[in-house]
Amino acid sequence: MPNMKITGVGMYVPERVVTNDDLAKLMDTSDEWIVQRTGIKERRYAPEGMSGADMAEKAFAGALKQAGIEKTSIEAVISATLSPDHTFPGMACFIQEKLGLNGCAVMDIRNQCTGFLYSMAVADAWIRTGLFKTILITGTELHSTALDFTTRGRDVTVIFGDGAGVMIAQATDEPDKGVIATDLHGDGKYAKALWVESEGSVFHPRLTHKMLDEKRIYPQMKGPLVFAHAIRRLPESMQAACAKAGVTVADVDFWAFHQANLRINEFACQGLGIPPEKTLHNIQKYGNTTAATLPIVLHEALEKKLIKPGMLVGFATFGAGFTWGTMLMRW
């Protein structure tokens, strides 16, 4: 049975840097307030007219070169995003067309911050069954067009940034490479703890002037509740995945965390005894790019040579839904 390995990773973030001081000019906040609660110093915003598919295209070029393959060998595109360019059709269709991959299979996964990890799990399953040998996984987020830049929206707005990351996953018969354990979870009981209420098909009509006036079109978050669950579920899943693989947390050579909040990741590392050299945090520079965070942090870790062939690499995420999970992969 073949296994999945990652042969190419690419990332793109827009040129425009938005600092905490920039946001402080628009709402009642400060650099100290934001850094203390999230660890974020700045984030990137896309220019008007740039789409999520455009960002994916820019990230794709580097991944394709790294993989050393022709794009015609890509048999499927899996797209993870909470901010699709349009309500329908799916984001994967727009990315496929942008990249000139017309004709291959396409699929969207809407698991927000955990979306990329779930996409990796689906790609692994497809490869193991022999359905496909080469799959493009994309995470693209264009948050800046859907944020409330007033004090009312401060708690959410200061967290998010725009960006894209992609991976090229390929089948391998090498016994010492690929995914060795996956642990996935969700709890819809907390779906409204971090969500956007409207527009929605449950409403008739889907969008009204009242919704706009009441700012129900903007993300809402119960921050303390999200934080409390994240610092519990993330370590639980990491330990569960390690148990499935027959290893310990200490055996993992590098951990790639979803970049939602630096404090959450620091808490997990401290609780599980993970030293700083075994991970990389870049939320300080980019904010939370949701489905794009895993490939972006992985790309930078590879550039810094923090990950080398033969290493055991862990991916851990927690996000809206609530959804969370861990994957272990021999690089």
Image (cartoon, rainbow, N blue to C red):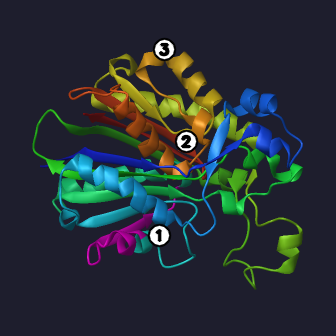
- Asked if residue 49 shows in the view, the reply is yes
Q: Quadrant of residue 250?
A: top left
Whether residue 257 is situated above or below residue 197 in the rendered picture: above
Left or right: 1 with respect to 8? left
Q: Are there few (<14), some (14-19), or many (20+) residues within 10 Å of tag 2?
A: many
Q: Which residues are magenta?
A: 95-111
Q: Quadrant of residue 131?
A: bottom left
Say which residue appears at 21% left-offset and 55% top-offset: 127
Q: CA distance from mark 2 to mark 1?
A: 22 Å
Residue pointed to by mark 3? 273
Left or right: 136 with respect to 262? left
Q: Position of residue 218 (x, y in %)?
A: 76, 61
Q: Give residue 91's mark.
A: 1
Which is more toward the observer, 215 or 189? 215
Residue pointed to by mark 2? 318
Give, as a three-letter code, the residue at label 2. Phe
Q: Reply yes or no: does residue 98 show up in magenta.
A: yes
**Helix, strand or loop at mark 2:** strand
Which is more toward the observer, 95 or 112? 95
